[in-house]
């Protein structure tokens, strides 16, 4: 029988409410322990007379779901001796139970039925990442009966964990090319509806994992409201059903739910702020993702630049929340990160020197000296594991920062960053833009294309509108640089449609209304060529790059999605007009609201929010959203300005102090259909451009 997600223990909803990653991790651990209600501590498990050893079988998608959550040694702790991919050739292991974790697709059901027929395992614990449709359940049952294996199927679980938790406050639905699927003008209605249904399915899993029914807010019209309406319907069905995953909370909040318990889910389309998906970044996590192509919290670094170095292979590094340097600096400006790496290296060398001094022996003939020497040796030995761990983190981030510096030098990323910020602030330099776009300008074709699209977006109307000659020169420069101008053509066509619709309705549409109004200048000088001397940096310290650029980077710029979310969370008189533009859907309301907020909730603030972007997100936008949870306090904003390994306790202490100063601390989670680099996003724009004849 199918066991619903709601049989899990109810999570508490405390001040740091949206601990999505932790709750998904707990669900995965329960699954690995054959879905027992209580996870037995490791010590108790080892004391048991028998241990249940098992095999874990996954499809590729669910492998990606588990990868950021559970390491190989943790799998062994839960009795998993072997993990295999469903589509790979597998040998029979007759005396071992198998835990399956797969998506509910016809292909996967057929593969499982084939495993029944082959009699691969002793028993089958089947776990689907989301709800298994009734027809597929019947096919699965028929396959087990045909193979005479019905008695071997222990249980079938709908887990509702069909998303990837990349950090405590970042998740992805891992839905490839979602922007193309949602924006393809040549797509059939059925294809668009299928893409919307996939988004709804993923968001339902997120809500189920949190164990709360959110209040949904979204811009009116378009795919975002389609998702909101369908998600509300599915949530309402589950709330009303007996034994559902939300049944433990059905009576909370008097139907509408108190603001402490009910988060808001803000759904946006990528077109709401197209520029945020194209901009070059200058902070650590967005740079690592965009430049070094971080995947599932892992980044591959090639040591050196010669063919011999490349042949020697790559080094892979995990960037997780358990890395104190990453936690302290992931939203710090890159020059600050370089300084912190050197600071930590200096602190490590000092600690090693102190250990060496402690181990120097006194007079061996003296009993007092002998006792002192023994204590020093014990202390030194005890400190070595911590020092070794610190050295691993230092080496990791030194290599990553060095790799980033190489890309900054070769591609002129500081110039792109400066120009894009100026363009979005309404003060771009056309000559500087055209200089970078020329074939002789630094940067990859994708870098040039991203800059060109931002330039076109900020000069698409009004007094700053490009002339036909300027547009032709822009496209010509791109083609000469080897870039595919199809992406630019698609964005220009979309901008013209937005302008036409705005002229007809008198209301600004899409993200273009916010691209310039919500951005401010980040640069206070014109030294955009500060890295021209980078060939000398490799013989110097990493922080040398920070000396010239640091003064240019002081800004608390808030991206459009973050600004809209903060207004929806505050929901006060100052933001009332803006909030009124967003539809309201609540599955726990007694009757459907039709997108209009009820009167008693029209000015109620919210402390917890989930932000979701359809069509792809990135770490730059996640960073801007994360700042909402930190609030306006200067000390809280300073947490993102860098800090070393030794600062982890201080950060935790400051967070606790901040939380103690108010009754409830804000928490915000950012998610997207997929996390995209700038190059990946322009590739999707290019695909759409070619579909529309550009």
Image: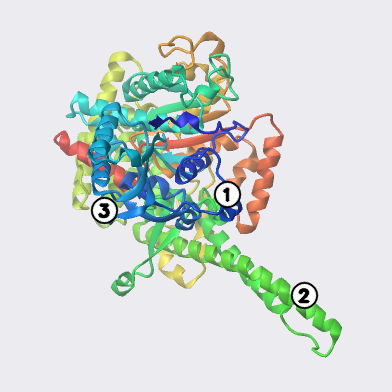
Q: Position of residue 75 (x, y in %)?
A: 46, 53
For the point 16% across and 33% down, which residue is it? 692
Q: Secondary structure at mark 3?
A: loop
Q: Secondary structure at mark 2?
A: helix
Q: Nearer the viewer, mark 3 or mark 1?
A: 3
Residues packed near mark 1 inside 10 Å, few (<14), some (14 to 19) or many (20 plus): some
Instruction: Name the mark on residue 375.
Output: 2
Instruction: Name the mark on residue 641.
Output: 1
Q: Nearer the viewer, mark 2 or mark 3?
A: 3
Residue 515 appears in view? no
Q: Quadrant of residue 38?
A: top right
Outermost bottom residue = 365
For the point 29% across and 27% down, which residue is it? 134
Query: Would you place residue 386 above or below residue 270 in this image?
Result: below
Circles 2 and 3, Cβ within 8 Å, touching? The answer is no
**Is 620 on the left or on the right of 360, as rendered?**
left
For the point 58% across and 64% down, which residue is it? 390
Q: Secondary structure at mark 1?
A: helix
Residue 227 appears in view? yes
In this view, the residue in front, 306 or 48, is 48
Circles 2 and 1, Cβ within 8 Å, touching? The answer is no
Mark sitting earlier along the chain (2/3): 3
Q: Which residue is mark 3?
A: 88
Q: Position of residue 286 (x, y in %)?
A: 44, 48
In this view, the residue in front, 546 or 490, is 490
Mark sitting earlier along the chain (2/1): 2
């Amino acid at each position: 029988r199918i066991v619903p997600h709601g049989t899990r223990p109810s999570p508490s909803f405390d001040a740091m409410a949206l601990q999505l990653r932790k709750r998904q991790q707990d669900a995965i651990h329960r699954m690995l322990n054959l879905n027992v209600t209580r996870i037995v501590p490791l010590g108790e498990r080892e004391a048991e007379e028998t241990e249940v050893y098992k095999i874990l079988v996954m499809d590729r998608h669910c492998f990606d779901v588990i990868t950021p959550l559970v390491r190989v040694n943790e799998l062994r702790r839960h009795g998993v001796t072997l993990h295999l991919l469903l589509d790979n050739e597998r040998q029979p292991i007759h005396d071992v139970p198998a835990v399956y974790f797969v998506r509910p697709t016809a292909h996967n059901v057929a593969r499982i039925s084939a495993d029944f027929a082959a009699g691969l395992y002793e028993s089958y614990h089947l776990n689907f990442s989301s709800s298994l449709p009734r027809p597929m359940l019947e096919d699965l049952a028929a396959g087990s009966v045909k193979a005479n294996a019905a008695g071997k199927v222990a249980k079938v679980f709908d887990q509702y964990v069909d998303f990837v938790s990349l950090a405590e406050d970042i998740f992805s639905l891992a839905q490839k090319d979602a922007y193309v699927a949602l924006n393809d003008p040549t797509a059939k209605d059925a294809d668009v509806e299928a893409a919307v249904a996939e988004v709804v399915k993923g968001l339902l899993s997120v809500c189920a994992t949190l164990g709360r029914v959110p209040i949904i807010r979204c811009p009116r019209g378009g795919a975002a409201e389609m998702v909101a309406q369908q998600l509300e319907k599915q949530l309402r069905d589950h709330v009303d059903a007996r034994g559902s995953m939300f049944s433990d909370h059905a009576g909370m909040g008097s139907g509408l739910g108190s603001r402490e318990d009910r988060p808001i889910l803000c759904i946006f389309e990528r077109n709401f702020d197209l520029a945020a998906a194209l901009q070059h970044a200058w902070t650590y996590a967005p740079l690592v993702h965009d430049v070094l192509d971080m995947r599932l919290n892992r980044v591959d670094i090639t040591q050196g630049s010669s063919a011999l170095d490349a042949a020697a292979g790559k080094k892979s590094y995990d960037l997780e929340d358990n890395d104190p340097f990453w936690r302290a600096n992931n939203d710090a400006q890159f020059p600050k990160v370089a300084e912190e790496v050197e600071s930590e290296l200096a602190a490590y060398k000092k600690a090693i020197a102190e250990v060496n001094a402690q181990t120097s022996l006194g007079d061996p003939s003296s009993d007092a000296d002998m006792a002192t020497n023994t204590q020093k040796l014990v202390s030194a030995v005890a400190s070595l594991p911590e020092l070794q761990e610190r050295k691993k983190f230092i080496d990791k981030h030194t290599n990553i920062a060095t790799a980033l510096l190489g890309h900054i030098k070769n591609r002129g990323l500081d110039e792109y960053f400066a120009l894009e910020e100026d363009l979005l602030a309404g003060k771009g330099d056309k000559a500087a833009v055209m200089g970078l776009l020329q074939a002789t300008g630094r940067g990859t074709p994708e870098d040039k294309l991203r800059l060109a699209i931002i330039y076109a977006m900020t000069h698409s109307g009004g007094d700053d509108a490009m002339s036909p000659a300027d547009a032709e020169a822009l496209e010509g420069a791109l083609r000469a640089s080897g870039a595919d101008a199809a992406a630019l053509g698609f964005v220009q066509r979309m901008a013209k449609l937005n302008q036409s619709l705005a002229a007809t309705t008198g209301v600004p549409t899409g993200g273009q209304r916010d691209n310039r109004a919500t951005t401010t200048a980040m640069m206070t000088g014109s030294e955009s060529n500060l890295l021209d001397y980078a060939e000398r940096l490799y013989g110097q310290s990493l922080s040398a790059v920070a000396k010239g650029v640091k003064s240019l980077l002081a800004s608390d710029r808030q991206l459009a999605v973050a600004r809209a979310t903060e207004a929806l969370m505050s929901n006060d008189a100052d933001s009332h007009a803006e909030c009124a533009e967003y539809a309201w859907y609540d599955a726990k309301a007694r009757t459907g609201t039709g997108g209009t907020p009820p009167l008693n909730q029209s000015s109620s603030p919210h402390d917890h929010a989930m932000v979701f972007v359809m069509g792809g997100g990135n770490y730059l936008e996640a960073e801007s959203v994360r700042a909402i949870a930190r609030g306006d306090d200067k000390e809280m904003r300073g947490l993102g300005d860098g800090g070393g390994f030794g600062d982890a306790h201080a950060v935790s202490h400051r967070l606790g102090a901040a939380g103690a100063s108010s009754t409830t601390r804000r928490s915000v989670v950012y998610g997207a259909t997929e996390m995209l680099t700038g190059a990946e996003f322009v590739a999707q724009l290019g695909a759409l451009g070619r579909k529309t004849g550009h």
